[in-house]
Structures are given as C-alpha cells and as structure tokens.
Image: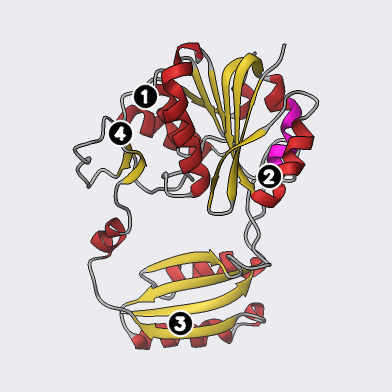
Amino acid sequence: MHELMLLAGEEHVEPLSQALLDELEALSVSVEDADAEGAGERALFGEPGLPPPAAGWQRSAIRALFADEARATAAATLLLAQDWAAGVELRSIRPVPDEDWVLLTQAQFGPVEITPSFWIVPSWHAAPPQAERVIRLDPGLAFGTGTHPTTRMCLRWIARQAPRRAARWSRVLDYGCGSGILAIAAALHGARGIDALDIDPAAVAATQANARDNGVALNAALPDAAQGRYALVLANILATPLELLAPLLAGHLDAGGDLLLSGILERQAERLMRAYAPWCALDIADRDEGWVLLAARGTA
C-alpha cells in the first residue's frame, strides 16, 4: 500500500478529493490543515453572528491511499497535468505498512480518565474497574471525545462540582454540543432538562445517538431551540464565537446558575472576561496544556 500526499489550496480540495476517489482508484482520502499547530492554523466553525463556516483551510494536506506505488504515481501524474490543478504540490509518495486499519485506528483511542471514578471509554474497550461513571463514546464526525484539554476540563468541572450543585441543575444548556459529551456527562451526574444544541445537523444526530447509547435523556436540536434561562450553561467552542455569543449565553443564565466556557487559550482569557463583564464575573477555574476553563455565577 502507498500513500500519495498533495499540498493544495482551499479551492482545490474538493475537486482533488472527488477525482482521487471517483476516478483514480484511491482507497481512502483524508484532508488535514497543512498549517496545524503553526502560526497559519485556522479553525473552521460557524456560529450565529459569524460568517458561514469556511469550506476548508487555506492550505490542506491531502493524503490518498492506493493499493500500490504504480497507481499512486499514475494518479499524481494525471492530476498535476490538469490545468485546473495549477498550484497543487506533490509532497510525497511513500509505502505504508499493510495493516488492519480498523484495529490500528482503535488502538489510538483508549479509555480516558477524567477523575479516578469517571472515565470516557470507547465501545471496544472494557471500563476500568474503578470507574463508577462511564461515557461510552467512539471517535466520529462530531468534535468531543474527551481527549482534548478543553473537553477534559469541562468534564472534570462537572464531575467535581456535581456533588454540591447537581441538585440545582434542573435545566442545562450545552451550546455547541458536538458529540454531546458534556450534556451526557451532566446527565450522568444528576442534571435534568438538558438542551444540547449545535449549528451542525451532523452534531445533533451524533448527540442523539450518543445519548441513546449511554441511556440518558436530553433534547438535541439546532440553536434556536434554546428557550428561557438555565441553571447550568456550557459552551466549549472557541474564543471568538464565545465573545460574540456573550449576550446570548449570559441571557440564558439563571440567577445563581453556573456558566462554563472552554475552548480558550490562556492569552485569550482576559478578552473573554471583559466581554462577559456586563453580565457576570468570569474566573479561571482550571488550566490544561495552555488552555483555560472560565466559570461564573449568574446574577439576578
């Protein structure tokens, strides 16, 4: 098996991917941000008040798997000869081990400890014996498997605060729910009346499926389903949409309720605190690998 890697601009990603899969016998195609973890990294998101989500990154690394080197080479030669592919760069054609790709993918995702008694466990793993609460969640299309620091911090906060506060969490809003992991965690720790909302219909569907698999009740829907005030408001998105959503999220927070914001780098914390200051006083509740978790109590 051989991997063909191309570097392409945003406008070339869709035609290249389609040609590789439909016409050039690629076994699979994946697309990654070529500038990930660098100065040019760009997040893709869409939220109310923001422009529509970007179709792709400014520069993408396109990786296509082929059965052999001859097919990979032929595909690269044909694509780079097209007038419309001007600017597409061939990075590499290299052999890759012929392995069981399902088992290899599964091996990358093991149980994730949130607290000693609360774990996120993929369906193909047994839960650790010390786990008293478990979310069964497999990697999928929607963001949120518990492995990213922003998600871990939210989950830790829920687990640690629930013994004292869950009795008050009679209504919960998870805004930008992704996989539904935060909403499910809140439900497992005693929260009720949960609205898990996302702008992406795929995330809504994933949340519904994950809630069903974990035996919890919640309402997964698009953002306009948010109604009234909530005792707990969760939003793990990114700093820019969180800043623009300040009036909306603060407006849904009940007096004395808990607001939890994540997806924020340490250098962005003060900016978010200023944005929410007219409604509540945010404080840093946790830190993890350069990210911070901000929390506040609602006022009357």
Q: Secondary structure at mark 3?
A: helix
The label nearer to you, 4 versus 1, is 4
Say which quadrant the C terminus sits in: top right
Which residue type carries mark 3?
A: Ala
Q: Position of residue 229 (x, y in %)?
A: 63, 14
Q: Secondary structure at mark 4?
A: loop
Residue that label 2 marks: 239
10 Å crowding of disc 4: few (<14), some (14-19), many (20+): some
Observer-nearest residue: 287 or 221?
287
Q: Is residue 289 left or right of residue 130?
A: right
Q: How much space separates mark 1 and mark 2, taking CA atoms?
A: 27 Å
Mark toward the start of the polypeptide (1 vs 2) = 1
Residue that label 3 marks: 75
Which residue type carries mark 2?
A: Ala
Q: Is residue 81 left or right of residue 108?
A: right
Write down the region rendered in magenta. 241-247
Which residue type carries mark 4?
A: Ser
* Residue plotted at (22% across, 47% down): 124
- Quadrant assignment, res 167: top left
Residue that label 1 marks: 188
Say which quadrant the N terminus sits in: bottom left
The label nearer to you, 3 versus 1, is 1
Residue that label 4 marks: 117
